[in-house]
Amino acid sequence: MATNRTFTMIKPDAVAAGHAGAILKQIQEAGFKIIAMKLTKLSPEKAGEFYAVHKERPFYGELVAFMSSGPIVAAVLEKEKAVKDFRKLIGATNPADAKPGTIRALYAKSIGENAVHGADSNKNAAIEGSFHFSAVEMVG
Ligand code: UDP
Ligand code: MG
């Protein structure tokens, strides 16, 4: 995946609350182009695999249960400095620390149920994008 791309998921809390449309609108208005997208649901096994990097963290079990609890929207986004700018747009992991106007400040319920995922590096954006999409599904 090109380095001007990032990977996101709208998490089960935000999809269930009906915020997916508003979040996608905010993402597009911030200048990100959607080049792949789908509504999907992770099995506990797939969620565990996706978050394997956090396996040793105390919240891993809870995170896997939450991320497999309902539908998510997975997407690959394109913009200059996509990874950096998207992390800025979503705000801090804990919504209590997220800057006003960021997606997590607006929609996250807690540090765990925090509305959106954003890749943290170009390398992980590529790995995570390929986890959900094949090359032919990326139309940008
Ligand atoms: N998480 C949690 N408790 C914590 C920290 C993180 O449940 O104390 C969850 C939360 O959903 C977070 C995800 O684990 O988005 C991944 O954590 P990370 O530190 O990578 O935060 P992010 O990159 O999503 O801001
Ligand atoms: Mg992270």
Image: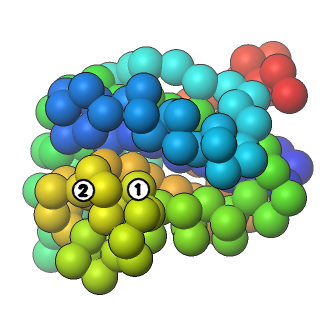
Residue drawn at (40%, 76%), measured in percent from left and top?
99
* Residue to which mark 2 is pinned: 108
Residue behind label 2 places its C-beta within 8 angstroms of ligand 1: no
Quarter of the figure that contains the C terminus: top right
For the question of whether residue 126 can be seen, the reply is: no
Seen from the viewer's position, the closer of residues 65 and 102 is: 102
Residue drawn at (75%, 29%), measured in percent from left and top?
35
Mark 1 closeness class: few <14, some 14–19, many ≥20 residues within 10 Å: many
Secondary element type, mark 2: loop
Residue 91 position (above or below residue 18): below
The amino acid type found where label 2 is placed reads Ala
Residue drawn at (32%, 41%), measured in percent from left and top?
11
Colour scheme of the rendered structure? rainbow
Q: Spatial distance from mark 1 to mark 2, Cα to Cα?
A: 7 Å
On the picture, is 87 further left or further right than 21? right
Secondary element type, mark 1: helix
Residue drawn at (31%, 64%), measured in percent from left and top?
105
- Residue 113 horizontal/vertical position (percent): 19, 54
- Residue 67 horizontal/vertical position (percent): 25, 42
- Residue 115 horizontal/vertical position (percent): 31, 49
* Residue to which mark 1 is pinned: 103
Instruction: Tell me, yes or no, whether the two marked residues, 1 and 2, touch with CB atoms within 8 Å.
Output: yes
- The total of numbered circles placed on residues is 2
Q: Quadrant of residue 37?
A: top right
Residue behind label 1 places its C-beta within 8 angstroms of ligand 1: no
Going from the N terminus, do you reach mark 1 or mark 2 first?
Answer: 1
Q: Quadrant of residue 93?
A: bottom left
Residue 37 position (above or below residue 24): above
Which mark is drawn over residue 76? none
